[in-house]
Amino acid sequence: MTWEELETRCMACQGCSLADTRTNVVFGVGNRQADVLFIGEGPGEQEDLQGEPFVGPAGQFLDVMLSVIDLRRSNVYIANIVKCRPPKNRDPLNLEQDACIGYLRAQTALIRPKIIVCLGRIAATRIIDKDFRITRQHGQWFERAGVHMTALYHPSALLRDPTKRPETFVDLKSLQEKIRELCPDTFSQVF
Ligand code: URA
């Protein structure tokens, strides 16, 4: 499938009841040739209104996290487990995740990232391990089919609880090291 086919299909999706309450489908954003793929949970209010991932308060904090390791949005690709906003920002139901995960799978197949960074528990349990414990396992590295994966605390969690930020700083430095090792060109893509 091409990007265009995938995006067209996703934008018209009626695969679960989130389609009834969404304003916009939030497909994904960034560099389609990126070596690093960030995966969040699902759109919040601002993302639903603007049709782009991580543009609300959590997104502003994600930009800070990226800048700590000299990354910008244009160096990476950013997508979510579910493409439509769960009402009142509740966790996406398994049924909704199941209905939507094929889009992320297809995006991942097109991007072929070397590194996947899960943002928060929902993405980590879906992508890395169903029993993933974010408090104990954030920053650890996993490898599957040649793809290196890690999870960070979700930027919303870091906004709510600043005491978690020093641990995330360490995790970000580990990510920076991994990028230097596996895909150093990531840092030189300036636009
Ligand atoms: N939180 C997420 O997990 N994803 C977004 O796109 C915005 C907030």
Image (spheres, rainbow, N blue to C red):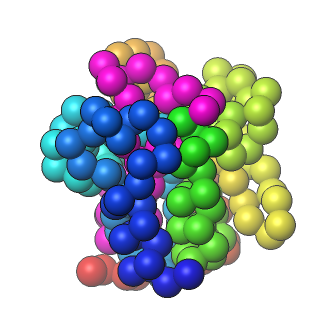
Q: Residue at x 48, y 23 (%)?
A: 91
In reply to whether residue 10 is colored magenta, the answer given is no
Q: How many numbered marks have been drawn onto this rendered protein structure?
A: 0
**Side of 20 where 129 appears, left or right:** right
Q: Would residue 118 be found to the left or right of residue 188 on screen? A: right
Can residue 187 be seen here? The reply is no
**The magenta stretch spans residue 86:** yes
Pick whichever, 79 or 68, lies toward us: 79
Residue at x-position 80% and y-position 69%: 146
Q: Position of residue 151 (x, y in %)?
A: 61, 41
* Quadrant assignment for the N terminus: bottom right
Where residue 59 sits in the image (x, y, percent)? 28, 43
Q: Is residue 191 above or below residue 51?
A: below
Left or right: residue 117 compared with residue 83 = right
Q: Is residue 104 above or below residue 111?
A: above
Spot occupied by residue 141 in the image (x, y as percentages of width and height): 74, 48
Q: Is residue 96 left or right of residue 189?
A: right
Q: Is residue 150 visible?
A: yes
Q: Position of residue 169 (x, y in %)?
A: 48, 39
Q: Nearer the viewer, residue 148 or 85?
A: 85
For the record, the magenta segment spans 66-95
Q: At 30% across and 45% down in the image, what residue appears?
A: 54
Q: Quadrant of the C terminus?
A: bottom left
Residue located at (28% from left, 33% from top): 21
